[in-house]
Structure formats: C-alpha cells, structure tokens
Image (cartoon, helix red, strand yellow):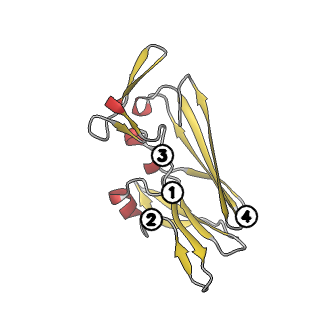
Amino acid sequence: MSTIPKYFGKFKGEDVLECQLISKTGVCIKILNYGAIIRDWQIPLLNGNKRCVVLGFDNIEDYIEYSPFFGAIVGRVANRIGGAKFVLEGKEYLLDKNEGLNHLHGGRTTFGKRLWKMTQISENSVQLNIFSSEEESGYPGNLNVKVIYKLVDNLLEIVSGGIKRGNFGIN
C-alpha cells in the first residue's frame, strides 16, 4: 500500500497534492487535497483489467473550471439554502449567494473548492483538515473539519467530523 503524496498541479499559487491508497486486493483510490476529492477509484476486474467507478478529471485545471463537485467534500452545509439565509436562535444570518438567489454547498468558500491540509498519512489512510472561520460565507462560529479516508481490501471507510466554536449546525 502507498500513501506518498505527489504533485498534481497548482491552485492559487499553492501545490495541489494527490495521495494514492492501494489495497492488497488491487483497489486503487486517488485523493486530492483540493476539495478532499476522490479523483479516481479503480477496481480490479476478473479479466485482469481495472475499471474506474467515479467521475473525475486528469488535471486540476478541469476541476477548477468545470467540476460540479465531483467526488468532493462540500460544506459547511451540503445542498441549497433557499434565499441564502437562515434564522438561528432569533438571529438572521445572510449567506453569500452562489447559485442564483440561493446558497449552494457552503457558498463561495465551499470546502469542495479549497485546499485541505494533509495532516496524517499512514499505510492505508489519509487525513485531511480544513478550517472555516467565523463569518466565512456568512456562517457563525469557527469550525475545524477533518475527513479520514481508509482503504482496507475492497472497502473505503470515510470518517468525517468537526470541532466548532459557537452555536450553529453543519451537515
């Protein structure tokens, strides 16, 4: 198994890295620190060939220009918030609008289009972390998020979580 990150391209002057997880059964998964994206997932076939089972691009430029969140971790909130606003404990929060009048997948600062930090790499797993500051895209409170991808044989385990400061929800 291999988790050595390699250069995949540049985003806003910073390196985009790709980490490859390979299991004993021949499953190969490639993960980017851009959006914590699962870029490629190859499974072995009975005839000895491999087949990709996810949508993805071969270069960072196409993710930046065309990707509608293929394989990405989005947030703070996944899906749309109608009217780009919500009320929490009697206070109205105005979010940035990035889909007409709505707020989609965390807005302009979505986790799916930012660089995550690869903080822990082990034999069969990679951990990525990202920080979202108070008032980013209009949300209250600070938030530290992590996602761990762990490949064992034919199973990919995805564990995500966050530590927040302030009263707000995430999904």
Which numbered circle lies on residue 123? 4
Circle 3: element type:
loop
- The answer to whether mark 1 and mark 4 are in CB contact below 8 A is no
Q: Measured from the top left, where is residue 20 in percent x and y?
A: 60, 67
First in sequence: mark 4 vs mark 2: 2
At horizontal 55% and vertical 61% (from top left) the residue drawn is 31
- The answer to whether mark 4 and mark 2 are in CB contact below 8 A is no
Q: Measured from the top left, where is residue 156 in percent x and y?
A: 65, 60
Of residue 120 and residue 39, the one placed in the foreground of this image is: 39
**In whole angstroms, how far apart are the C-alphas of marks 3 and 2?**
16 Å
Q: Which image quadrant is residue 57 in?
A: bottom left
Q: Amino acid at mark 1?
A: Ile
Name the quadrant of the N terminus.
Answer: bottom right
Residue position for label 2: 56
Q: Measured from the top left, where is residue 3 in percent x and y?
A: 65, 65
- The answer to whether mark 3 and mark 2 are in CB contact below 8 A is no
**In whole angstroms, how far apart are the C-alphas of marks 3 and 4?**
26 Å
First in sequence: mark 3 vs mark 4: 3
Left of 49 or right of it: where is 153? Answer: right
Mark 3 burial class by Cα count in 10 Å: few <14, some 14-19, many 20+: many
Mark 1 burial class by Cα count in 10 Å: few <14, some 14-19, many 20+: many
Residue position for label 1: 37
